[in-house]
């Protein structure tokens, strides 16, 4: 997996994160965080996304095809202070001051030489000749020399830390037997169903975890619709989310509908640094809102998730 920073320039702000989020999710990436800044050139958007390295080209192609994006840049994400946006307008606190001119170097003027008195000659002492001797001079004690001039031994190089290779898990279908076994408990305990969902996660293999959560969400959402809202007339998508989706899902977790998406806060299924459990919420809304929406079409995708570093989970819903 890789983390990339996407910087893009757009003309309008409204619904921009949702539109770009669709391109990001369709390319196999997950949105971690986003930042929007108004600029004289337009709207500057910065996204941090995570996904397989082999799909980076697919992400760039999807961004090129997005009509909301005027231009963009994709680079590896680096921790630290925010990187300046490539399309930001340059501003100055004051007018630039030109550099001061380099002072000219004056040429020194030649002057007449001044006579300097020579010092008095100093008598050099005669060299004393020492007669050569044939006796060998004693060599210095090797142990003593070692103490006087210790050799500096370089510290050993640190052992390389082994890097575990990333292994991409191939998704499997839902474990229907486990879902069917826990479905009566989900219906009986609703809306206090988080312990049952956490048990579901532990009862299936990792490759089937998301698909099993999705199926459990679809079955639970359809059950809630049949119990509480079956007599309701067909509604528009916005009304269905406000009058069905928010009350039903809000009984399970803290939610807020802002028009551009459904925001889920403090999801117990999406702990920071853990696995994402947003598939259950997507399936729940699918089973709950599908029969209630007059258009008959429903599309739900996860824009960002708390488990990937976002402040909250956001689901985009469209028909």
Image (tube, helix red, strand yellow):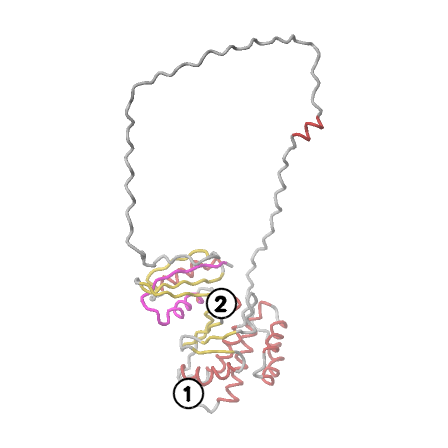
- Going 60% across and 74% down the picture, which residue do you hit? 198
First reached walking from the N terminus: tag 1 or tag 2: 1
Give yes or no for contact between labels 1 and 2 (Cβ–Cβ under 8 Å).
no
Please tell me which residue lies in front, 148 or 238: 148
**Mark 2 lies on residue:** 310
Q: Quadrant of residue 88?
A: bottom left
Please tell me which residue lies in front, 213 or 115: 115
Q: Dot 1: few (<14), some (14–19), or many (≥20) neighbours within 10 Å? A: some
Cα distance in 3D space between marks 1 and 2 = 34 Å
Q: In this view, does 127 lie above or below 309?
A: above
Q: Is residue 252 magenta?
A: no
**Mark 1 lies on residue:** 234
Q: Residue 189 carries which label?
A: none
- Residue 11 in the image, given as x and y percentages of width and height: 31, 66
Quarter of the image where the C terminus is located = bottom left
- Residue 136 in the image, given as x and y percentages of width and height: 70, 14
Q: Dot 2: few (<14), some (14–19), or many (≥20) neighbours within 10 Å? A: some
The secondary structure type at the circle numbered 1 is loop
Q: Is residue 7 magenta?
A: yes
The secondary structure type at the circle numbered 2 is loop
Q: What stretch is highlighted in magenta?
A: 2-25
Name of the residue lying farthest toward the bottom: 231
**Residue 129 in the figure: left or right of residue 225:** right
Q: Mark 1 or 2, which is nearer the eye?
A: 2
Q: Is residue 193 above or below residue 90?
A: below
- Residue 156 in the image, given as x and y percentages of width and height: 63, 41
**Residue 79 in the figure: left or right of residue 106:** right
Q: Is residue 21 above or below residue 133?
A: below
- Residue 5 in the image, given as x and y percentages of width and height: 43, 59
**Residue 110 in the figure: left or right of residue 22:** left
């Amino acid at each position: 997996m890789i983390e990339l920073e996407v910087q893009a320039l757009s003309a309008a702000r409204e619904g921009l994160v949702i539109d770009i989020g669709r391109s990001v999710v369709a390319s196999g990436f997950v949105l971690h965080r986003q930042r929007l800044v108004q600029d004289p050139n337009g709207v500057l958007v910065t996204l941090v996304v995570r996904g397989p390295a082999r799909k980076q080209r697919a992400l760039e192609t999807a961004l090129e095809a997005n009509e909301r994006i005027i231009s963009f840049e994709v680079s590896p994400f680096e921790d630290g202070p925010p990187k300046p946006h490539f399309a930001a307008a340059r501003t100055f606190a004051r007018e630039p001051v030109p550099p001061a001119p380099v002072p000219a170097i004056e040429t020194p003027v030649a002057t007449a030489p001044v006579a300097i008195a020579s010092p008095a000659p100093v008598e050099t002492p005669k060299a004393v000749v020492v007669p050569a001797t044939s006796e060998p001079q004693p060599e210095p004690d090797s142990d003593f020399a070692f103490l006087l001039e210790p050799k500096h031994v370089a510290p050993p190089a640190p052992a390389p830390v082994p890097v575990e290779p990333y292994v991409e898990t191939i998704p499997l279908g839902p474990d229907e037997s486990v879902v069917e076994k826990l479905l009566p408990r989900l219906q009986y305990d609703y809306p206090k169903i988080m312990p049952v969902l956490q048990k579901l996660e532990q009862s299936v293999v990792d490759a089937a975890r998301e698909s099993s959560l999705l199926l459990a969400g679809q079955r639970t959402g359809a059950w809630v619709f049949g119990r509480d809202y079956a007599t309701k007339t067909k509604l528009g998508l916005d009304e269905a989310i406000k009058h069905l989706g928010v009350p039903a899902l809000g009984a399970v977790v803290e939610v807020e509908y802002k028009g551009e998406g459904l925001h889920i806060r403090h999801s117990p299924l999406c702990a920071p640094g853990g696995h994402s459990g947003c598939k259950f919420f997507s399936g729940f809304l699918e089973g709950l809102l599908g029969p209630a929406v007059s258009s008959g079409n429903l599309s739900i995708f996860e824009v960002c998730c708390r488990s990937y570093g976002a402040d909250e989970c956001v689901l985009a819903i469209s028909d």
